[in-house]
Amino acid sequence: MIHQLRPDLQLISRLIPERSRVLDLGCGDGELLKLLERKGCTGTGVEMDPVELTAAIRAGVNVIELDLNTQLDEFGDDSYDIVVLSRTLQNVYKPREVLRQIARIAVHSVVSMPNFAHWRNRFRLLGGRMPMSKDLPFEWYDTPNIHYTSLADLEPLFQSLDLQVDRRIPLDEQGHAHKLGWLAANAFASSAVYLLHAPR
């Protein structure tokens, strides 16, 4: 399973210090947590999709079924060192509330998000069609995405919650770090990974 790890998850794993206590929200089949075990990390995955949940359990991941929209208060303040929210924020009903909760649960967090303002998406909209890409591989009627944002719109949300951006890493369409200046990233990055911290 690890050899097929998404490149963005490999990058996220490098951002997480050894022996961290990790909460992975929307953990899928648990591949990131399995990789982090090699670094001595301990963790909990949270997943609602029954297929992914079953795969995580079969892989030996400590995973629970929990609704990110309503049940994050199950976790105590500062109960983890770092929370990961990878390609999940756009799927929750109230992104602001989920970010507020993860800032309470851990000082540090890693958030990744597709960039809906990527130039290919803009081009497709100009042609009168809803965007589809490697990062957004869904027809409009089948998408799990509820909220659509650009990278330029995402950072003010972090700032409004006093979440400080320690690192921002724009990614290309294959999920690798993009060699772009940040101003160009809003048009040319397919997605981005943010390392955040919530001052105490």
Image: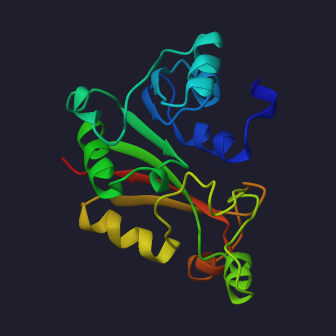
**Image point (24%, 61%), residue name:** 162
Answer yes or no: is residue 68 visible. yes
Q: In x, y percent, where is residue 118?
A: 66, 75
Q: Quadrant of residue 55?
A: top right
Q: In x, y percent, where is residue 4?
A: 80, 33
Q: Which is nearer the eye, 72 or 196?
A: 72
Residue farthest toward the bottom in the current orientation of the protein? 126
**Image point (75%, 87%), residue name:** 127
Q: Which is nearer the eye, 124 or 95?
A: 124
Q: In x, y percent, where is residue 189?
A: 66, 70
Where's the N terminus, which quadrant?
Answer: top right
- From the viewer's perspective, is 30 left or right of 160? right
Q: In x, y percent, where is residue 196?
A: 39, 53
**Image point (63%, 64%), residue name:** 140
- From the viewer's perspective, is 45 left or right of 184? left
Q: Which is nearer the eye, 41 or 90?
A: 90
**Number of callouts:** 0
Q: Is residue 182 above or below residue 98?
A: below
Answer yes or no: is residue 30 visible. no
Residue farthest toward the front in the current orientation of the protein? 141
Residue farthest toward the right in the current orientation of the protein? 3
- From the viewer's perspective, is 136 left or right of 53? right
Q: Quadrant of residue 31?
A: top right
Q: Is residue 20 above or below residue 61?
A: below
Q: Which colouring convention does the figure follow?
A: rainbow
Q: Is residue 186 above or below residue 195?
A: below
**Image point (67%, 66%), residue name:** 190
